[in-house]
Amino acid sequence: MNGLLQAYRQLWTNRELPVENNENETLMNAITKELLDEMTHPRLRKNIHFKFHSSVKRILSSSLNQDQKLGLIEIHLKVMENLTKNPT
């Protein structure tokens, strides 16, 4: 996951993402918040499948290199699997 937090930061302008305990945990927490649409007012939140689709599209259309794109999509898949197995 080396460098993937920095790559993820490039997808979002004007969003600070300070490292909490470690970069891996910070990245996983940020993606979880993204997929659960926690940055949006509860009445306006999209469902997790829509957010996953939007996230992958954002990654694919970014200027990141192929390794970064693949790494971020793999992490999104992991988080998505965890969230759908254990809904909050």
Image (spheres, rainbow, N blue to C red):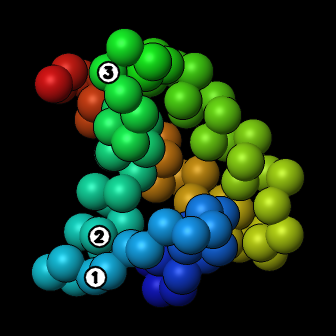
Residue found at x 46% / y 54%: 75
Q: Give the residue type at disc 1.
A: Val
Q: Is 29 placed left or right of 13 in the picture?
A: left
Asked if residue 50 is positioned above or below residue 38 in the image, the reply reads: above
Viewer can see residue 5: yes
Residue position for label 3:
42
Where is residue 62 drawn, in percent x and y? 81, 61
Q: Which of marks 1 and 3 is nearer the N terminus?
A: 1
Q: Give the residue type at disc 2.
A: Thr
Q: How far apart are marks 1 and 2 (CA)?
A: 6 Å
Residue position for label 1:
19
Viewer can see residue 79: no
**In the rendered structure, are the residues bearing label 1 and label 2 in contact, judged by CB atoms less than 8 Å apart?**
yes
Residue found at x 29% / y 70%: 26
Q: Distance between the residues labelled 1 and 3?
A: 26 Å
Asked if residue 27 is positioned above or below residue 50 in the image, the reply reads: below
Where is residue 44 drawn, in percent x and y? 45, 18
Q: What element carries label 1?
A: loop
Residue position for label 2:
26
Say which of 68 and 59 sits in front: 59
Say which of 30 and 28 sits in front: 30
Q: Which of marks 1 and 2 is nearer the N terminus?
A: 1
Where is residue 17 drawn, in percent x and y? 38, 73
